[in-house]
Amino acid sequence: MTINPFTLEVLRNKFDTITEEMQTVLRRSAYSSIIKEANDAGNTIFTVKGELVSQSPGCPSFLGMMIPAIQRILELFPPTEMKEGDIFIMNDPYEGGTHLPDITILMPIIHDSEMMAVNACIAHQSDMGGKFPGSKPMDATEIFQEGIIIPPLKLYDQGKVNHTLYKILEKNTRLFNIVGKDIEAMLAACRIGRRRVLSLCQQYGKDIILQCMAELLDRSELMTRKEIERIPDGTYSAVEYVDHDGVEVDKLIKIKVSVTIKGTDMTVSFNGTNPQTKGPANSTPGSTMASVYFSFRCITDPFLTIHNNAGCFRPIKLIIPKGSVINPLPPAPVNARMPTVAAVANAFLQAMSTALPAKVPATSGFAGSPGFSGVDPLTGERFAFMDFLCAGVGANPIGDGVDGRSAVMNSCLNIPTEVIEMNFPIRVKKFSLWQDSGGAGKYQGGNGIIKVYEVTRGEVTIFHQNNYQKTAPSGIYGGEPSRKQETYILRNNGDKEPVSSKAMNILHAGDKLAIYVPGGGGFGKPKKRAPEAIKQDLIDGKISKAMAKEHYGFVMKSVC
Amino acid sequence: MVNFLEIGVDVGGTFTDIVCLKGKEIFVTKVNTTPKDLSKGIIEGVAKILKTANGKHEEVKRLVHGSTVAINAILQRKGVVTGILMTKGFEDMLVIGRQGRRDLYDLFAEPDTPGFIAPKRMRIGINERVDYQGNIIIPLDEKAVRTAASKLKELYSVEAIIVCYLFSFASPEHELRTREIIKQTEPDIWVSLSCEVDPIFREYERLVITAFNAYIGPIVDMYITKIENELNRINIDAKFQIMQSRGGITSAKLVREKPVNMIMSGPAAGAIGAAFVGQSVKADLSGDTRDNFITLDIGGTSCDVALIYQGKPMITTEANIDKYPIRRAMIGINSIGAGGGSLVWLDSAGGLKVGPQSTGANPGPACYGWGGVEPTVTDASLVLGFLNPDYFAAGEVKLDIDAAIKAIEKIAIPLGLDVFTTASGIHKVMNSKIAEQVKLVSLRRGYDPRDFYLVAFGGGGPVHTGILAKELSIPLSIIPATPGVLSAFGLLVADLEHENSRTLVARLGEGNGLVSKIASDFQQLIDTGNRQMEEDGVSLDKVRIRKSADMRYIGQSYELEITLAGNISRDSLKKAIKDFHTQHELLYGYNRLGTTVEFVNLRTVHYYSSPTKMGTVTGGKSLEVAQKGTRRVYFEEFMEVTLYEREKLPLKQIIDGPAIIEQPDCTTVVYPGQQCFVGSSGNLLLKNRTQQGE
């Protein structure tokens, strides 16, 4: 039976609309600012074989990230045995997960008592217990310190809730009043997804739906292979660094990638990458894969003409050495994996810039995240939240990098200042662009940002996860690197303490946390930059007179 | 007997369309848009229609206007020079925004924030701070405001200043005082305050809508004044009303106060007109209860597409203009640069491209003979034989076929093709662009276009709709009686609407005062709306009022809008809470009975439906009488095609394609294999030829 091309197009869009709607339902009904404001969540449809059919647009770091988790659940609980009303849950990084705060929910879609597909949802929880609020201890040396580990389990068994598991979670997490409701919101998202897929079955017939899913995967593979074929054959390598692991703070962590293109196949090898770290900088295979998949899609199909599904990943062979920082063995801690994940993407992009010079920008700044927790003396209630920063984007062959934006693997939105202050004992004192932080070049890297938080009352525990204090986002084709990352605590008594890129601390009322996030690298030699552009940047304070002089040899008499 | 005239004026990129209702008679005409001074074309058009309708100036009761002046200023980045005053430390909010990116995978993507409204040198931080409860933490630095206002005026000649301080919705004091100070020093500067434009939390979203309000404010103000003066000059003392983005009309005076409400004024009128047509066409579709329509408005510069679902234009409250969030209810309209005036060009690889640049009214397509030499879609339509060179825009414009051929040759020669194949290729590219756009607004939102009918209008809609319906598997196209001026017509059938809202944030059960507080807040909103209606000269007994509340579970930050029926009482609020749980279940698949529900914003909308009625349609005598000869038309090959005069077509007589149906304001192309007839509603219905047994 051949598929009507119109039906295929309709269903392709229906699948995407369904995962998008799941995302909306989750965001609209969640309680934590990390989901509802920052959008740190993802929703998907998978085949029964664990192939990704559709994923909601949202976090790049979630693209394909759920594949190992879903495959693991389907391995442990064969689809033939899944029953109506079963719902599965997990967060175990060593069973396909990422880090403990990311909970995955899987809901089978059963049509006429036969399992036909799967809805799955992942979302960052406010707390999963462990030694540090928000479950982000930057100094952890074992996963057990990071929180409670949930292996793949049934949350619901044929409609009956697993009270035991709920009780254990309630006793082992700090903010169960929020976490419990966010899990409910995830279930709501999956239920909507299931309802929509089932109504498609009613409309088109199950066989057509399954056939279209398979066809969409095949077509994406075919189209992706054509894109790979356009890349010149050869092996391309690059190296990128992460400051340290939070424990051994003098050791740079090296990420080495070699990409081999041969015809329509691509092999991405991480041989030569740093062994797993003592501290929590380790990235499990799901996170590492997502990073490669996402950056690969950026350079082969930036405008998404190819349907974003598992077919796109079939031509890629990944070599991730066991026991390395990108494929650690238990019980290595993993909570601060994001700088590593971003470094994987940046290394991959840098390698590909040799093969595809017109498609790759200079390296962008890494947008880290601070977390705040404590008990608000005003209400007596415990709180924990994470804000997401932004950086400057690397300059590209056709223009300057964008100022202050989530770049590459970062995509979470900031928590609006008004939302922070309405809910937490924190005041944002400053949120602005950081002058001179982008790398000089023919095209200049975007500027990063400065964000200053002040504690208004009580005692607040903070964690700080960042990168590029030791190295800087690099320029390309003669472009200069951006500035390095800086963070300080400004005590109420006037003391200024530097904060490392993976650190924890305690602030009291009147203390401030000031974070400077780097810009992006420059593109091309600075002396090729148009004087008019330098002049405009001076007038707008994007760069200082000193930077104009030192990096561009440009002097302007009077600046308005 | 004194006749009352109602006039609708829709200004498009190329033509200004005018519709006049005189009792049950309807008159239509078109004049050229005069881009340098739009009021010139408007006045010319009004004069012309009065002559046609044999009406007097003093008989004009109301004049309703749909305008693209606001959206054009935004899209072309031609707003006024503005400065921004923000809480110190947050001067870059306009550029940073929420820091996200729409095109996730595009590593070279442009900014997603409207930094062009005010470059950094014109964004000034003011030392002041209000906390979330409205307490003043740092008093307003009045001197800094004064200095900033003078600096912005003297150095940069700003025409407008945007003021957006943190938590101004909790305490507007600092913003109000800032305006006073600016007005003292620089009385001519237009000031837009965030506490008045959109007093809702989330500072970036509030800033953006406030900024656009200022960016277009002085332009809208001047524009309205100019038209009012011109109307006065020709002795028209009618009510001057303007279409708002949400699909209702209001007085020009109220639009001036919140110009951001008229961003989608022009396109909204078309959707309202199409919804009216959708209702009227039911008489012709016995047993077919389909109430869903996709509007296809192809004008000179753009193609606008909107969904009418279950009889109503779909309203969105999360609209983006370009990619900037505008927190206002508006009809969801998707616009792309594909119209009759869209320029045809070859890319570096020799690929044929259509638009998005348009020649507009000046110089216009080559065939207009106004000095244009570049090929456009209209030139292709003429070369293909779709258009009648002597009967275009009611005969206003004589089309020059030689000029069109010459222009198309500029593309045909490098491609090594003949002009007809090239013209046909131009149409294919144009049609596939529009088909993709229709898919975007339907499929992308989970609607199957096959469940809809197309309503085709604008000068170009009826030329392209037949082939588009086929491509999209849409079974039927509807071409209204006056498709070339449907937007102008929509202006006259739209409701008068006034929306008012205020933030409350309260929980039922929080003390006994709440019911009376909500009731008195609603009463104030109702009084405001009543006053607005009275200003519009409407008697209040004919006004419908819809009350609603934005509600949420405590702890959530997104609200659902729930309608409140009847008087406000404990029972009606309880009913609203019950409805909220039900609605939540419906939308999100679950509810949380027992959890406290908050009332966040209270809203009222006042409606007044104008008593416009359409006359009955009689139709012509026979198809033979309607025939006006034949013409050679190119449909992949040349065919001798019968031409018909739309106004003389009889009712319910089927015309088999290929055929061309001409009328003063547009041309309908019936492609080979298709057929059409005029229904009893006066609309032309076009579909694929019925197969045996169907």
Image (cartoon, coloured by chain):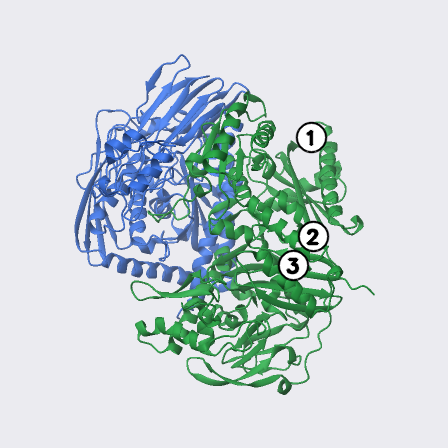
Chain colours: A blue, B green
Is residue B108 positioned above or below A10 on the image? above
- What's the amino acid at mark 1? Gly
- What's the amino acid at mark 3? Leu
Q: Which residue is mark 3?
A: B491
Looking at the figure, which quarter contains the C terminus of chain B?
A: bottom right
Near-viewer residue (B646 or B444): B646
Regarding residue A331, the answer to whether it shows in the image is: no
Q: Position of residue B30 (x, y in %)?
A: 60, 67
Regarding residue A80, the answer to whether it shows in the image is: yes
**Dot 3 and dot 1 residues touching (CB under 8 Å):** no
Q: Quadrant of residue A246?
A: top left
| Separation of marks 2 and 1 at Cα, in angstroms | 37 Å
Is residue B492 positioned above or below B84 on the image? below
Q: Secondary structure at mark 3?
A: helix
Subunit of label 2? B
Disc 2 or 1, which lies upstream in sequence? 2
